[in-house]
Image: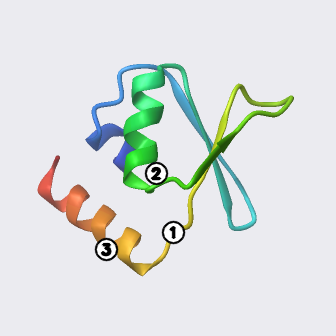
Amino acid sequence: MERLALSLGTVGNYAFETEGTTVYAAFEEDADAERFAKVFRSEQTSRDSEWASKTFARMDDAIYQWMERLLKSGA
């Protein structure tokens, strides 16, 4: 996740936390969060008491392969 965040040109602070098979990502800048969400092809956004917003995405083989190509290309 760290390499992906750096390859996407993240400019603000960010943090990742894992809980089992769930990965939580927090971004200081909305633009950083939006770029990250595009990578994961997010399906839904909601609000709750812990986060200003949440975006949910499933990571299937196609997403893993796309992320791998993105990281190898240095984009």
Pointer 3 residue: 65
Tag 1: residue type? Met
Measured Cα–Cα span from mark 2 to mark 3: 14 Å
Where disc 1 sits, the SS reads loop
Pointer 2 residue: 1
Question: Given the current orientation, which residue lies at the most extreme left position?
Answer: 73
Between discs 3 and 1, the one toward the N terminus? 1
| Of residues 36 and 10, the one drawn nearer to the viewer in this rendering | 36
Where disc 2 sits, the SS reads loop
Instruction: Give the label on residue 59, or none.
Output: 1
Q: Position of residue 23 (x, y in %)?
A: 64, 54
Mark 1, residues whose alpha carbon is within 10 Å: few (<14), some, or many (≥20)? few
In this image, 21 relative to 73: left or right?
right
Q: Residue at x 21, y 65 (%)?
A: 69
Q: Is residue 2 visible?
A: no
Between discs 2 and 1, the one toward the N terminus? 2
Q: Position of residue 16 (x, y in %)?
A: 60, 42
